[in-house]
Amino acid sequence: MVQTPTKSATKLPPSKHEFAEVIHRLEAGGAMIPDTPENLMQIIAIWKAYAVPMDFYWRDLLYIAERVFLNPLPFFKYFLPQEYLDLQNHYSGDKADLRVWRGTGSAHPELLEFMEKGETGKIPRLLHHLWHDRINMEFAEECMRAMLWHRGMYVPINQFDPYLDSDEYKANADRAIKAYFKKDPFMLALHKAFPDLFLEQCRQMSYYSNLGLFWEVMAPVFFEVSDLYDEGKVKTVPDAMNFLVNGIFAIAGRPIYHHVLIDGETYEIIPKSKGFTWLYEAALPYVEAVFYRTSPFRGTKSYNAQAKEVPDDQKDFHYGVLYADKFPVGTAGIPPTLLAQDMLHFLPPYLMDYYK
């Protein structure tokens, strides 16, 4: 019997790509950064610093979606009432549906302390706000607008977005709009003359709720992994990443909905019974819209179509977190700077000591 000799596999020369080490590490199942104690420390510190303002973001997003709603002059939408500061997170505290963080279910103690004192000391809340000595909710709203503007992502897996154009959604929104303006004949007349005006605002409120429910999950996950690190139970970068992934997927099926409270009555614009879930209807669109796409930061690019500084197709937008330009990131008033300022207030002492 004649046997055909097997050919030896061609050996490729070592890659000379500048990111070859990163590529090989990812192919081997590793993380994007090397597993070192310093890297782990910085990852956990950043997650913790992000989680505290996030605890404000999700509460205020839900407050705006549920209570402020279509207020044409929402001057005090960033002034969280005590009811929402006491609102129990579904994934932390003694009353949690699934307890991820062992801490409190109400607003984080560090957040409450900052809201009271800020950087300027203990002064009336309105003065803190006017001095901009507060949590920058503008960052959260920019993330929400990115999700709203880049609609249609991951359809048909994501059914939340198509539902916003359905007759059922329009009927639910119409009932809520009429109930909200029932004592304002001018606004009711405006709604009758231009029915799409408040409907589009209602869609935006639904994305406020979507993002708020998304971040309600992420905050306790970050808080808990930070506590575990402090206790010496998270010792490697893979440990941290595995906890994050396991925590997320344990809650992947949480419902995404939009309810509005008007004069003590609840209007279900997007009922829980629709079956929209955290992973498909919130997490996936969030990652695509915020990490990859977003929009050019105001003041850094010309929005003039003739200038050709902005892509014609939204699919070509690449202004997200992963593409952050080093120059505009330090510019006042743009989203990354707003977030960085928020996080600066809550950096763990060990990170501050590391960079001294």
Image (cartoon, rainbow, N blue to C red):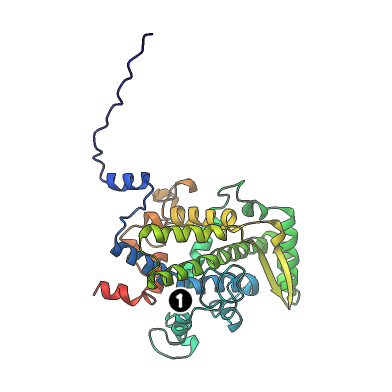
**Residue 46 visible here:** yes
Which of 153 and 353 lies nearest the eye of the viewer?
353
Q: Is residue 182 left or right of residue 314?
A: right
**How far across and how far down the image is residue 243, in percent?**
46, 61
Q: Residue at x 36, y 53 (%)?
A: 31
The C terminus is located in which quarter?
A: bottom left
Q: Name the amino acid type tagged 1.
A: Ile
Q: Which residue is mark 1?
A: 135
Disc 1 is placed on an element classified as: loop
**How far across and how far down the image is residue 196, in percent?**
68, 59
Q: Residue at x 39, y 48 (%)?
A: 29
**How far across and how far down the image is residue 132, in percent?**
43, 79
**How far across and how far down the image is residue 201, in percent?**
63, 64
Q: Single out the residue that lies furthest toward the front.
A: 1
Q: Quadrant of residue 327?
A: bottom left
**Residue 337 visible here:** no
* Total numbered circles: 1
Q: Is residue 252 left or right of residue 302?
A: right
Q: Quadrant of residue 214?
A: bottom right
The N terminus is located in which quarter?
A: top left
Q: Single out the residue that lies furthest toward the top.
A: 1
Q: Residue at x 54, y 70 (%)?
A: 58
Q: Is residue 58 left or right of residue 336?
A: right
Alpha-carbon neighbours of circle 1 within 10 Å: few (<14), some, or many (≥20)? many
Q: Residue at x 41, y 84 (%)?
A: 118
Which of 190 and 215 lies nearest the eye of the viewer?
215
Q: Is residue 218 left or right of residue 308?
A: right
